Amino acid sequence: MVRIGGLSLMVHRLKPAALAYVIHVVLLLVVHNADGADYDREQKWAAEITPGIVVGDPVYLEGRAGRRFLNIYTEAPNAKAGLVLVHGIGVHPDWGLIGTLRGALADHGYSTLSAQMPVLAQEARPEEYGPTLLGEAGERLKVAVNFLRAKGYKKIAVVSHSMGSRMTHYYLARDPDPPINAWVSIGWGSEGDFGQLKFPVLDLYGENDLPSVLKGAQRRAASINDARRSRQIMAPRADHFFGNQQAELVRYVREFLDTSL
């Protein structure tokens, strides 16, 4: 007998064709579970952070299969543009440097929508974030962008961190003409590549960033095309999370957006 979750199978009683079918189904289930989002964890994040939101308002948008996901929308008076903020691996839209940026950039005249990305279990490694989950992240980004467009923003940019940059690229690379005017990518790893993008890009990373980010810096720089005002910046003394460098982080991002949008 083989037990899978609550399902028990007497595999020795199955004919070869039936056994092959069962194995196929089991493999599909395993792949799906390995690559599927942890929605319970998302709901826990939302329940924990929404009561403490001081700047901005929680907004729930609808993604894959009608599933709602949390966003934090902060509207700036007479905003220059709308920004979609994309957090890194396994966290939430008010976490760390994303929480800092969404409030500070609103103070500088940019309305921000910080979107909850799909997450896996806490112990999940970056390589476990596969195509199914990245595809769902891309769908959420599209929904977030459309939300800002419906609000009337003519200029829209994305500001992403770490795994959020991988998710953003997955979305942008599969849309032949994304309604994006600029992208700030912070701390993207060694797979980073901006080659096919036609709008201004800032590749921002820290002098003391993660090894994979530092390793990919030359490749990312080489992939930045001739799009007007695109550039790469290495922030002196900064680590992957810009600890104790938050004011500098905001300045780098703001100055790029001010000259690119």
Image: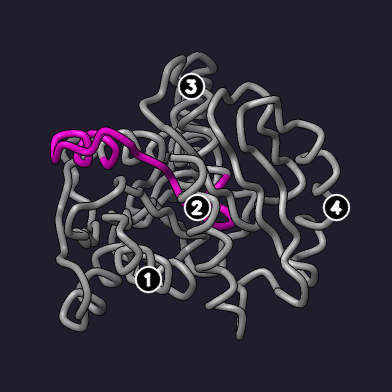
The C terminus sits in image quarter: top left
Q: Which residues are magenta?
A: 144-165
Residue type marked 2: Ser
Residue linked to disc 2 = 160
The residue at 76%/77% (across/down) is 237
Q: Earlier in the sequence, mark 4 or mark 1?
A: 1
Q: How is the image coloured?
A: one colour
The amino acid beneath tag 4 is Lys
**First of labels 3, 2 by sequence position:** 2
The x, y position of residue 52, in whole percent, is: 21, 83
Q: How far is the residue under mark 3 from the one under mark 4?
A: 26 Å
Question: Disc number at residue 215?
Answer: 4
Q: Judge from the rendering whether residue 2 lies leftward or rightward of residue 111; answer left or right.
A: right
Q: Which residue is mark 1?
A: 104
Question: Any magenta on residue 162?
Answer: yes
Q: Nearer the viewer, mark 4 or mark 1?
A: 1
Place of residue 159 in the rendered image (x, y in percent of width and height, measured from the top left): 47, 51
- Which residue is depicted at the point 54% across and 67% down? 251
Mark 2 or 1 closer to N-term? 1
N-terminal of the two: label 4 or label 2?
A: 2
Q: Secondary structure at mark 1?
A: helix
Query: Mark 2 to mark 1: distance in Å?
Result: 15 Å
Q: Are marks 2 and 1 in contact (CB under 8 Å)?
A: no
